[in-house]
Image: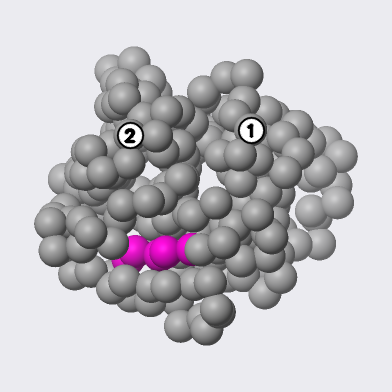
Amino acid sequence: MRVLIFGATGMVGQGVLRECLLDPEVEAVLTIGRTPTGQKQEKLREIALANLLDFSSIERELSGCDACFFCLGVTSAGTPEAEYARITYDIPVAAAQTLVRMNPGMTFVYVSGAGADSTGQGRTMWARVKGKAENALLAMPFRSVYIFRPAFIQPLHGIRSRTKVYNALYAIFRPFVPILRRVAPDRFTTTEQLGRAMLAVAKRGASKHVLESSDISGVVA
């Protein structure tokens, strides 16, 4: 299987990349983002692209991919709605429009978030924008589209968020993780579990196309 990852330098993307590189069924991994991860692996190839709304210069590189894991994102805290929409809606839709033309048999997996508003009418900005992106992607004629809506994600294996405040929060809550897992297991996942679940749906599909946090925990790679 040949996979494409957007946002491999982010916390979720790092987890997905790790699982893809470890999986013997994945023969090649291509990452696309503004900056490369800096990792050196035989089956890893990275493309740094300044304008993530225009893929015309690298279209030839995008053909032949079996799955795309779209993990690119930004915190809504302090981000103006126009910028948040550009990253959360415009970029994934632009990428998907190119990919569905190049690889109609591809499985496209989009990382959204718990509480995303698929009606597109809610008052919460981030939920409304994510819901709009989900709807646009689900309507595209890929072989399959899956939406992942994780809630609390625990970073493992030295993975860190690019958002400093998230790293501070993870450090504060780390002693309470065992309690959180017992109290609210359906709201809890890890970067490892999330990466494996995304690979699993790319390989074998799933019974639903929008997977909430509780669904993610039930997917086995």
Q: Mark number for residue 204? A: 1
Q: Mark number for residue 104? A: 2
Q: Amino acid at mark 1?
A: Arg
Q: Residues within 10 Å of mark 1 (few under 14, many from 20)?
A: few
- Contact flag, marks 1 and 2 (Cβ < 8 Å): no
Quadrant for residue 15, please give it: bottom right
Residue toward you, 109 or 27: 27
Q: Quadrant of the C terminus?
A: top right
Say which residue appears at 50% left-offset and 59% top-offset.
13
Please state the horizontal and vertical placement of residue 117, each as a whole percent of the image.
39, 23
Cα gap from disc 1 to disc 2, whole angstroms: 17 Å
Q: Is residue 148 above or below residue 66?
A: above
Residue toward you, 220 or 35: 220
The part of the chain drawn in magenta is: 29-33
Secondary structure at badge 2 equals loop
Q: Amino acid at mark 2?
A: Pro
Camera sees residue 206: yes
